[in-house]
Structure formats: C-alpha cells, structure tokens
Image (spheres, coloured by chain):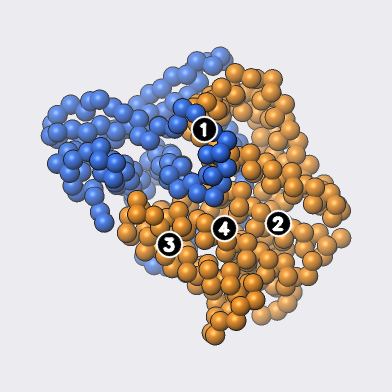
Chain colours: A orange, B blue
C-alpha cells in the first residue's frame, strides 16, 4: 500500500466514522448548543469524504479540512470537559491529528513519520490493553471479566448479565482476549499474519459493540488499520 | 478560554494510555426523583434510563450504526465518575450541571415531568461485596433540588 493511498483511505474511513458520530449528536433530543458544535463537524466530514474519494472542490483540500476539524474539536472538547466517549474519542482525535500532520507537514519524511505514529499507536493500543490485564490478578483468574458482566455499567441489556454465571467460559474468554492483545505485535511480522490479526481484532471490537454498545470503538479502530498495513510494508 | 482549554484537553490524545478495563471497580448508577416543591421529600427514587431487560441480536446489530442514547448513557457514567473523583470545583460543577441538564431534558421529552417540578439526582456505587457474586451499593452523591424549568434549554 502506497503512503498517499493509505492516507486517503484512512481519511475516507475517518470521515465516515465522524459522520456517524456527528449524526448521533444532531437529533432533536440533543441541546441546540451541542448540535451547533456537531453540524459543522458533519459538513467538514462530508467534504473530507468527498475530497478523499477524488472529488475536486475549489479551495478545499484534505489538509485544510483536517485542520478545520481540529479547530472544531477545540470547541467540542471543552463542551464535554474532555472526551464524550472515552477511548473511542481518544482514537478519533489521534487519527485526526496524525492525518492533519500527514497532510500538512512540508517534508515527505515528516509526513511518513506522522502516519507511522498512528500505526504504532494502533499496535500499542492492543498490546497495552493486554499488558494492563495480565498484570492484574483479577483478570488472570477470570474474576474481572465476571465483574464486568455482574455489576459494571457496560452490559447493554440485563439478559447479558447472565454471562457472569458462566465463570469457566469467561475465564477462557478473558485469557483469549489477553493472549490476543499481547500477541498482536507478533502479527506485524508478515502481511498475512497482520491481516489475520486485524480481522480478529475487528471481530473483537464487533463483539464489544454488540455486548457493551461500544459501536464507536468498532468504526474508529478500523479507520486506523490502513496505517499499520502501510507501516508493515514500509518497515519490513 | 479558546483555544487553551481545548488544547489542554486535546494533548492527552497525542500520547494515549490505552489502559482499557485495567481494573473493574465500583460502578455508578444514576437515579432521579421528582419533587413538587423544593422542601418535599425526594421519593420515590427511580433509576435513570435503565437498560432493557432483553437486548436482542437485531437490536445489537442496529446499534452498530445508530446508538445515540446508549452513548449518552456512557457519557453520563463518565460524568458520574468525574464528579466522584473531581480534583477541581470546575470539573465537579460541569459534571453536576451536565447530569442535571441531560436528565431533565430526557424526562421532559418523555413527558415524565412538569416544568413546575423540581429534580434531584443521586449516584449509587454498585460493587461486589465479597469473594462471591453478592452485590452491594451505596449512595455517594446527592444533588439539591433544582427547578426543572431552569434546566430546560432549547
């Protein structure tokens, strides 16, 4: 995958994810002050999507549009006093900042570095999530995942709490998650293993979206996949 | 003040920690009570936006694309956690105000309250009480009564 193609694909995917997120903030149930922040985000994202797909819009290029989105977020972040949707927002901002740098930095090497940083952070996002679990006794024993289903705020339906009554299944599931997250850097060694790793990771995000309602994680993590696929080719 | 507050909040995104679910700790629940007068007793307490008893697979799939209410509920959990661990008066005030505004707006849109009512919210911390699966809870925060009319914004 060539750098420009990977950046374009990431921008198009991020724009789509931003459109989905923004629409959720534009329904009538939302306060007008919040809608006023997300209306420009929706327009900028649609324009970025069009430009990423090859549309020619006078005076608008991806560099300008990503910069405008960063400025838009300088208003959105204080409104929520931080991220609205935790890790999903952090990844959204990281993808946006890396793309903004990749589009606007003057030297090709700097542009590569900015995009490579996104790929590296994606790899770290899995490894670090596995590391903080494996050093925790409750995760190693399966207790933590039982607690997630038993009393945490995440299960999106009361019927899902019944999973807490299946400790052996959760023990295996917990170790499967820890093992996958810790082993993810090894998938970087070849394109085939990386592709397989990303498919498994997407299924993992899909399961989290279904069980815990974390739909924004699913879409925004996929947005960063082109960066690691490009980085793998570039480095190895 | 723009742009400094935004930049301060943006900076952690450059070097994220990625410590997802590193520990499963006590979990907040948001309750509300509607009062006819500010000095009336706050009863009964009702859980705000309880999760559905059964979440069907087709709903799960639909929520992949459209999940605004649940995402707002997750934001309410974040606000509750920020309020309980607030290191500044500004953070506590922002969290409390957002919680009240969002609960009041939702109750008003569902015609659960009257503009003349007063709203009170509280946070319950739910956690496991021992090595088994027994669950306990404790109220850790309770707001004062606020006039619904003052919380309804366009």
Whether the residues at callouts 4 and 2 have beta carbons within 8 Å, the answer is no
Q: Could you tell me which chain the residue with mark 3 belongs to?
A: A
Residue B105 in the image: state x and y as whole percent: 29, 46
Dot in front, 4 or 2: 4
Chain of the residue under label 2: A
* Residue with the mark numbered 1: B55
In the rendered image of this protein, does residue B77 appear above or below residue A160? below
Earlier in the chain: of badge 4 and badge 2, it is: 4
Quadrant in the picture for the C terminus of chain A: bottom right
Comparing labels 2 and 1, the label whose residue is closer to the camera: 1
> Spatial distance from mark 1 to mark 4, Cα to Cα?
24 Å
Cα–Cα span, label 3 and label 4: 13 Å
Asked if labels 1 and 3 touch by Cβ distance under 8 angstroms, the answer is no
- The answer, for residue A129, to whether it is visible in the render is no
Outermost residue, bottom side: A58
- CA gap, disc 2 and disc 1: 30 Å
Res A36 label:
none
Q: Residues within 10 Å of mark 2 (few under 14, many from 20)?
A: many
Which residue is the site of mark 4?
A17
Name the quadrant of the N terminus of chain A. Answer: bottom right
Which SS class for mark 2?
Answer: helix
Q: Can you tell which mark lies on residue A38?
A: 3
Lateral position of residue A187 relative to residue A70, left or right: right
Q: Which residue is mark 2?
A: A225
Mark 1 belongs to chain: B
Q: Under tag 3, what secondary structure? A: helix
Which one is earlier in the sequence, the residue at label 3 or at label 4? Answer: 4
Q: Residues under labels 3 and 1: Cα distance?
A: 29 Å
Tag 1–tag 4 contact (CB < 8 Å): no
How packed mark 4 is, by other alpha carbons closer than 10 Å (few <14, some 14-19, many 20 or more), is many
Q: Where residue B49 sits: x, y (%)?
A: 38, 35
Q: In this rendering, would A163 be left or right of A227?
A: left
């Amino acid at each position: 995958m060539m750098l420009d193609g990977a950046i374009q694909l990431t921008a198009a995917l991020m724009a789509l994810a931003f459109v989905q997120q923004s629409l959720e903030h534009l329904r009538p149930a939302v306060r007008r002050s919040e809608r006023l922040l997300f209306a420009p985000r929706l327009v900028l994202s649609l324009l970025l999507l069009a430009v990423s797909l090859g549309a020619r819009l006078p005076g608008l290029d991806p560099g300008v549009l990503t910069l405008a989105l960063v400025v838009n977020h300088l208003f959105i972040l204080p409104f929520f006093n931080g991220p609205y949707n935790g890790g999903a927002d952090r990844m959204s901002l990281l993808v946006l900042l890396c793309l903004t740098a990749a589009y606007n930095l003057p030297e090709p090497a700097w542009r590569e570095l900015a995009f490579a940083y996104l790929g590296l952070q994606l790899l770290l996002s899995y490894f670090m999530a596995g590391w903080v679990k494996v050093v925790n006794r409750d995760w190693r024993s399966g207790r933590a995942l039982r607690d997630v289903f038993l009393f945490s705020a995440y299960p999106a339906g009361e019927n899902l709490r019944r999973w807490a009554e299946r400790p052996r299944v959760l023990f295996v599931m917990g170790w499967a998650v820890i093992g996958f997250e810790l082993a993810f850097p090894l998938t970087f060694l070849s394109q085939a293993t990386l592709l397989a790793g990303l498919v498994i990771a997407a299924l993992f995000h899909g399961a989290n979206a279904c069980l815990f309602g974390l739909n924004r994680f699913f879409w925004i993590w996929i947005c960063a996949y082109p960066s690691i696929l490009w980085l793998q080719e570039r480095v190895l | 003040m723009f742009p400094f507050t935004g930049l301060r909040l943006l900076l952690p995104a450059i070097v994220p920690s990625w410590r997802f679910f590193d520990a499963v700790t006590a979990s907040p629940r948001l309750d509300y009570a509607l009062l006819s007068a500010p000095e009336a007793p706050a009863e009964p307490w009702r859980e705000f936006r309880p999760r559905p008893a059964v979440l069907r697979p087709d709903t799960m799939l639909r929520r992949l694309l459209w999940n605004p209410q649940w995402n707002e509920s997750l934001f309410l959990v974040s606000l509750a956690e920020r309020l309980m661990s607030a290191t500044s008066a500004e953070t506590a005030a922002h969290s409390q105000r957002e919680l009240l505004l969002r609960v009041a707006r939702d109750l008003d849109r569902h015609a659960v309250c009257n503009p003349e009512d007063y709203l009170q919210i509280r946070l319950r911390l739910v956690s496991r009480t021992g090595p088994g699966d027994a669950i306990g809870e404790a109220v850790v925060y309770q707001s004062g009564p606020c006039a619904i009319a003052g919380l309804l914004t366009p």
